[in-house]
Structures are given as structure tokens and as C-alpha cells.
Amino acid sequence: MTCSRALLQIEPAPVAPLIFRRETAFRTRLVRQFCSSLGPRVWPLWNPFGPFLDEHGLPVWFDFFFSVKSVKVYFKGQTTPVLLLPIWGSIVARKSYKIEPGSVWIASGLIARTSALSGYYTGLKVLGGTLEFSENVEVSSGQLVINPKCKCPASISTWIQM
């Protein structure tokens, strides 16, 4: 019986969700605006539960906001990331990753090959997507490390703001 290294790797537990109690039934864009005000982490995964009756018989809801990590992707042997991706859950070695809603950052030097763009990034606000690698990637400290010759087409949906 063989076991892949990815199955044996123990990942740290994801960040605990933020939990809020509310006494009003609503589903509006205010929740999305609230999520964006939570700070540098992206919190787009909102999961409401309820209504439940409290000790006075009044309805209450509990909202769970789950964190999405900004995962860095490095070329093997380089110290600066080439991509920053919003990915939820544990990061293990595999060929495909689901991109969550948030911001994707691409090293600008990959878009326009000039040394003047070294250290600069181009950002896209995305609704989500997938990133496929032509080979399994390595995982080091929760970050992805890829072979520079690895092909990685992405399929993403972006927001277009007018």
C-alpha cells in the first residue's frame, strides 16, 4: 500500500470564523460591505444560521464569516512571489486550486517582460475561478512552490465596475 506525501502532511487548523449574533432577518449588500471592512484578510464566505428562538422567544440568527487566505505562489529558487491568490482551506500539494472571490495579484514582470517592473504587482478583483498546474506543486510553510517551466492556465471571473 502506498501513501502520497500530500496525504501525510499535517496542515495547521484554518483560522476560526468570526461569529455574530443578530436579531433582524436581512440579506443585503451591507453584509458584503461589512465583510470588506474586517481588515486585511478576505472574508467573503458568509454562512447564516437561523432563525433560532432565544430565551425570550425572539428570533435570532448567527452569521459565520470564514477567512480566505492569500496564498503566495513562488517559482522554485526565487524569494519573491509571482502570484497571490485567495484560497480557502488547507493548502496541500495538488494540481488544481479553487480561487475564491477576492483579489488576485500577478507579478507585473510576468505580464510585461521588463526589469523596470521588478517588485510590482498587477491586481484583479475576481469573483472566483480555478488555477490548473501541469504538475503537482510543492507546499512550503503554507505557500505554493512551482517549477518555472510549469504551465498554469487560469480560469477566472472578474468584476467589471463602471
Image: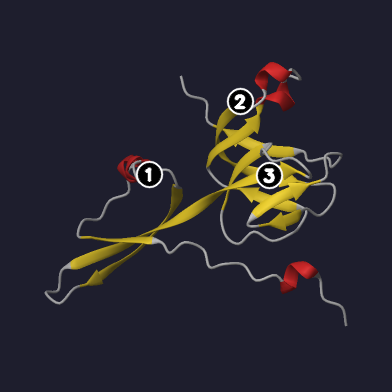
Whichever of callouts 2 and 1 sits on the residue coming sooner in the sequence is 1
Q: Which mark is residue 120?
A: 2
Q: Is residue 152 left or right of residue 15?
A: right
Residue 76 horizontal/vertical position (percent): 79, 45
**What's the residue type where badge 3 is placed?**
Val
x 69%, y 56%: residue: 140
Q: Is residue 91 left or right of residue 16?
A: right
**What's the residue type where badge 2 is placed?**
Tyr
**What's the residue type where badge 1 is placed?**
Gly
CA neighbours of label 1 inside 10 A, class few (<14), some (14 to 19), many (20+): few
Whichever of callouts 3 and 2 sits on the residue coming sooner in the sequence is 3
Query: Which residue in the protein does label 1 denote?
Result: 39
Please determine whether, in this image, residue 158 is positioned above or below residue 89.
above
Query: Which residue in the protein does label 3 denote?
Result: 73
Separation (CA) of disc 1 from disc 3:
22 Å
Residue found farthest to the bottom: 1
Specify how the rendered protein is coloured. Answer: secondary structure
| The image quarter in which residue 113 lies | top right
Separation (CA) of disc 3 from disc 2:
15 Å
| The image quarter in which residue 80 lies | top right
CA neighbours of label 2 inside 10 A, class few (<14), some (14 to 19), many (20+): few
Using the image as rendered, state which of residue 30 and residue 58 is in the foreground.
30
Q: State the count of labels.
A: 3
| The image quarter in which residue 103 lies | top right
x 57%, y 29%: residue: 123
Whichever of callouts 1 and 3 sits on the residue coming sooner in the sequence is 1
Q: Quadrant of the N terminus?
A: bottom right
The answer to whether marks 3 and 2 mark residues whose Cβ atoms lie closer than 8 Å is no
